[in-house]
Image (spheres, rainbow, N blue to C red):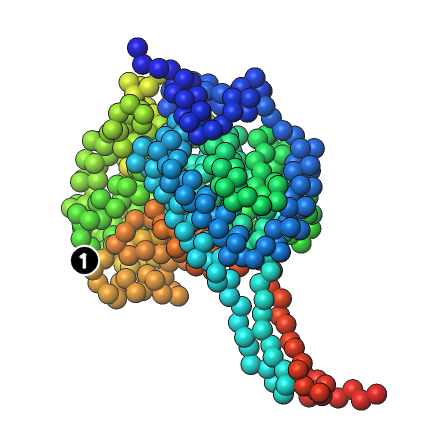
């Protein structure tokens, strides 16, 4: 007899060094979407615990901000080493708790390792500019200082990578982190804490409470958002969540990095390499069971290639393997829960009512027990971009539409609330550059001949409009975790005023 998923989970947690007191005997039920079974009952924390965690983080900040940045980078280097050691187990726990395929679970941990490497390099940079000054005997420059306590709110679908993007940067930038993970994925959060604790033990002299996890409900997230000592709230989730978090933090003049919904699209042009486009679309739209914020949800296909591409896609949708990610090599795992399944079915009904032709989308009952929600991904041929096409449904639904003029397709592409990721498939330079131009895609990520998902950590990650405008991860996203001071130094014996102003007393 094979072990129950709860036993497998306990074994993995044991290997990762998470003590059983942290996940048994409590009131927060944790389920695996793989079988729908309960795998843990965690003790929960409340708003008073959040306040106490922030108290500790404030103390940690005072010490950590004075540690030289390259030394702070050493902690992140050790975190990267520990993640390499734990990659298989943490990836497996991601599969158990979020339902990802083993390859995607491991890929998520790889993103964590990559951001650690990036942050270590950054810890010897954190550059400011030197700026020409108009006054003789003066020097003007900018200095980047640690910001303060960083609050991280993360979603179930990238339960560990999003924490690491924020934490690796926050730590090298001199900030402590208080993390409220999704209530659907608390175990992976505890595992990250255990891994970081090992890095901290090897590091030696870090202040206590540099990174803390708060396992709890909505009110713990609210306490984090409302506390004026939390200088930056980095929140990943729905646009609805962002509409609540953004104004609350703004009202106290705090900073936010919001990474919210996506309604990402691809455009397939007449000159596209259709075989490549098909494979990119298949991964972008069906990978992670459509539960990435970067999942491709809309596709505009030129009318001259529609009949060559779309039947092949329909075939791929019919044949893609759907099943238990722990016991089968299936490419598509489960939806996170019943609510996700119901939202998918409601969207498909609405699409039919709007004239759509639905391929797939039905529940795959033989993939798991009654309490697990496996679905065949849905491809929906739509007569126009209406109804559910305009909204993000967090499930594997790809709405396909036909276009004849690229400018019209780009206008349609941009005519939704979200602005996260986008792709064009073409071998025509003019079309590619038009899509990337100021008059092209309005998203934070715009790609050519690759899908919308699977961004590397080296680029800034995030999007415009209802996606929230935040940027995490690579490029200069680190600046969001620091405060900038402009310094002007007078090393002369005179006191010339700027703009030639005189004030002689
Ligand atoms: C998310 O779904 O919240 O680009 C993040 C990607 C991943 C990150 C997705 N690197 O798909």
The image shows residue 423, relative to residue 184, as above or below, that is: below
Task: Give the residue drawn at x 78%, y 86%.
Answer: 503
Task: Give the residue drawn at x 65%, y 77%.
Answer: 489
* Quarter in which the C terminus is drawn: bottom right
Q: Nearer the viewer, residue 146 or 340?
A: 146
Q: Quadrant of residue 285?
A: top left
Q: Quadrant of residue 93?
A: top left
Q: Position of residue 234 (x, y in %)?
A: 55, 47
Which residue was labeled with disc 1? 271
Task: Give the residue drawn at x 51%, y 62%.
Answer: 126
Looking at the image, residue 69 sits to the left or right of residue 335; the answer is right
Q: Position of residue 230 (x, y in %)?
A: 64, 47
* Quarter in which the N terminus is drawn: top left
Looking at the image, residue 18 sits to the left or right of residue 285; the answer is right
The image shows residue 440, relative to residue 357, as above or below, that is: below
Q: Position of residue 144 (x, y in %)?
A: 57, 63
Q: Quadrant of residue 104?
A: top left
């Amino acid at each position: 007899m094979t072990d129950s998923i709860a036993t497998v989970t306990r074994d993995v947690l044991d290997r990762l060094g998470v003590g059983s007191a942290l996940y048994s005997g409590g009131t927060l039920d944790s389920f695996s979407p793989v079988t729908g079974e309960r795998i843990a009952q965690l003790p929960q924390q409340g708003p008073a615990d959040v306040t106490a965690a922030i108290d500790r983080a404030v103390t940690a900040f005072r010490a950590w901000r004075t540690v030289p940045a390259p030394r702070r980078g050493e902690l992140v280097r050790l975190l990267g080493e520990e993640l390499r050691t734990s990659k298989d187990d943490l990836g497996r726990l991601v599969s158990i708790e979020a339902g990802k395929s083993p390859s995607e679970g491991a890929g998520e941990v790889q993103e964590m390792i990559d951001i650690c490497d990036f942050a270590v390099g950054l810890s010897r940079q954190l550059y400011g500019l030197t700026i020409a000054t108009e006054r003789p005997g003066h020097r003007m420059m900018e200095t980047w200082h640690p910001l303060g306590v960083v609050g991280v709110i993360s979603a179930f679908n990238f339960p560990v990578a999003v924490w690491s993007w924020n934490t690796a940067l926050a730590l090298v930038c001199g900030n402590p982190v208080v993390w409220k993970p999704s209530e659907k994925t608390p175990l992976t959060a505890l595992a990250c804490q255990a891994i970081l604790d090992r890095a901290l033990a090897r590091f030696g002299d870090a202040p206590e409470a540099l990174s803390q996890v708060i396992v709890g409900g909505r009110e713990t997230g609210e306490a984090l958002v409302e506390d004026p000592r939390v200088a930056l709230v980095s929140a990943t989730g729905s646009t609805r969540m962002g509409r609540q978090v953004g104004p609350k933090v703004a009202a106290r003049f705090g900073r936010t990095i919001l990474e919210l919904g996506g309604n990402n699209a691809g455009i397939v042009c007449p000159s596209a390499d259709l075989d490549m486009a098909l494979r990119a679309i298949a991964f972008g739209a069906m990978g992670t069971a459509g539960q990435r914020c970067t999942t491709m949800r809309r596709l505009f296909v030129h009318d001259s290639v529609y009949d060559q591409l779309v039947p092949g896609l329909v075939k791929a949708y019919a044949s893609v393997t759907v099943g238990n990610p722990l016991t089968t090599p299936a490419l598509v795992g489960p939806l996170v829960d019943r609510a996700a399944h119901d939202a998918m079915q409601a969207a498909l009904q609405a699409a039919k009512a709007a004239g759509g032709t639905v391929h797939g989308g039905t529940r795959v009952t033989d993939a798991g027990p009654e309490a697990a929600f496996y679905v065949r991904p849905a491809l929906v041929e739509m007569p126009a971009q209406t109804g559910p096409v305009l909204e993000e449904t967090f499930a594997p639904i790809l709405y396909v539409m036909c276009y004849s003029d690229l400018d019209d397709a780009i206008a349609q592409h941009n005519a939704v609330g979200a602005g996260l990721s986008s792709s064009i498939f073409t071998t025509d330079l003019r079309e590619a550059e038009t899509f990337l131009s100021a008059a092209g895609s309005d998203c934070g990520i715009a790609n050519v001949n690759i899908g919308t998902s699977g961004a590397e950590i080296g680029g800034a990650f995030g999007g415009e409009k209802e996606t929230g405008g935040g940027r995490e991860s690579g490029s200069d996203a680190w600046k969001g975790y620091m405060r900038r001071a402009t310094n002007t130094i007078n090393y002369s014996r005179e006191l010339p005023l700027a703009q030639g102003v005189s004030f002689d007393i």
